[in-house]
Image (cartoon, rainbow, N blue to C red):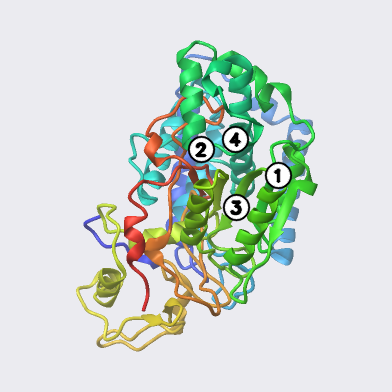
Amino acid sequence: MDEPIHVNALFLGPKAENYRFFREMLVYLMDDHADWRRFFHPDDPPIVTGETQNQPDFLTTLQKTREALIELAGNLQLSSMPWFSPRYLGHMNTDTLMAANLGYMLTLLYNPNNCAYEGSPATTALEIEVGRQLAGMMGYETEKAWGHVTSGGTVANYEGLWMARNLKSIPQAVRDCLPELTAGMDDWRLLNLPTGKILDLADRVKAAGCFEDLRRFSVRGAGMSGGRLGRVLVPQSKHYSWTKAMDVLGIGQENLVSVPVKGDYRMDTAALKEIIEGLAARKIPILAVVGVVGTTEEGAIDEIHEIVRLRDRFEDRGVSFYLHIDAAYGGYARSLFLDDGGRFLGYNEVHRQRTSTKPSGRCRRRTRSPWTRTRWGMSHTRRAPSWPGTAASSTSFPTSPLTFSRKATTTPCSWAATSWKAPRRGPPWRPSGWPTGWCPSTSPDTGGSSGAASRGLTVFTGLSSSTVPSTWAAARSTSFP
């Protein structure tokens, strides 16, 4: 983006300072939609005539609608949390973008249904565009990534575990429909195949014209039976959606295993190793391990690179599992480390750019950077820095593009905004150590794939999953001192 963006122009404002613009655009958009209706087959006679509008029951209905809306407005003002106010730091919620609010209200009038293209030609194209933007933000090739926009992190977690469950059942389903492809493999071996090899098997079945048989023999057709697919390992800091997902998907909550966290609220990878070893010794397969990038309560970031390293070591011993990264809260922080072309930046380059940011679109340099290096990573001062010729003001705190603090974070993003807050204590956070991505190289029905070398690790940003790019490990060396 060549032109700078003034963050304060993106929001309605704590005192509704930008209300004139908001109202102007709202009226314009509503008028524009009304004109679309008026001029759609303009020769058609009106359904609602002036005579109808003057009937008593018509007027009474409008009055009831008016009263209901006024009552709703009053109830919302009396009972809602003031997320927009810089005085509020109780939860991760924050103000929303004017563009998002206006776009949402406008789109409601068109009522698209993105389940099928014919029901949403405009918004399906927008969904693809947003998906490619997110894929690029997370480090994926935008023309190869796959995914879709969900209603939020909970549904994304459901879909991630749904995919893990389906993938785990494929090798045994392959044995049932094309046994020659799994010759010499017992149940334990089939339940511990790496994700890439599972997808390769599915490709071979599809090439043989037996994909429908594979679907019928897999858990999608045959259903769950006695928890044979194994356990799901999650940190104690997990989101509550994981417990519900085990129920919804028929895996059973008894198969959900909590892994202890350390004092910094990150998953204890030593404890994870012990749990995996114990399950392997009892010949109990592991369906999936869940790592969290930004826990709901503490904003902690699990050491994903250590979990990946642990999985690689166990795969050498014939034990493998699907790895899901729940990044609905923290994944969007990766945007801080991208330049305008989407190139990932190391810490030193990010620090240099932060110290030379142009304030308010004017070509002035900051006298000091609000971003500071700490023992645990990068932090942001609550009070805004002074600009040459201006006084420091704490009112700019809530309008920072992304604010890191111990108690709360704010980030303006309309489609899949996620926030991240630094852990209170613990080892250095490694920004370029994140295995990050957006969409899987295979669709949720586990059919078809591409790029086998990059399969096997999913990262959820409130939308859908993905396999980690093969280049992420090389970038892991950069860390905070």
Amino acid at dot 3:
Val
Mark 4 residue element? helix
Indicate which label's residue lies in the foreground, 2 or 3: 2
Label 1: few (<14), some (14–19) or many (≥20) C-alpha neighbours in 10 Å: some
Three-letter residue code for mark 4: Arg
Q: Earlier in the sequence, mark 2 or mark 3?
A: 2
**38 and 203: which one is in front?**
203
Label 1, label 3: how far apart the Cα atoms are: 17 Å
Q: Mark 1 to mark 4: distance in Å? A: 12 Å
Labelled disc at residue 284 = 1
The residue where tag 3 is placed is 290
Give coordinates of residue 233: x percent, y percent.
66, 53
Q: Which of pointers 4 and 3 lies earlier in the amino acid sequence?
A: 4
Q: Nearer the viewer, residue 33 or 480?
A: 480
Nearer the observer, disc 2 or disc 4?
4
User: Which comes before the other along the chain, label 1 or label 2?
Assistant: 2
Which residue position holds label 2?
195
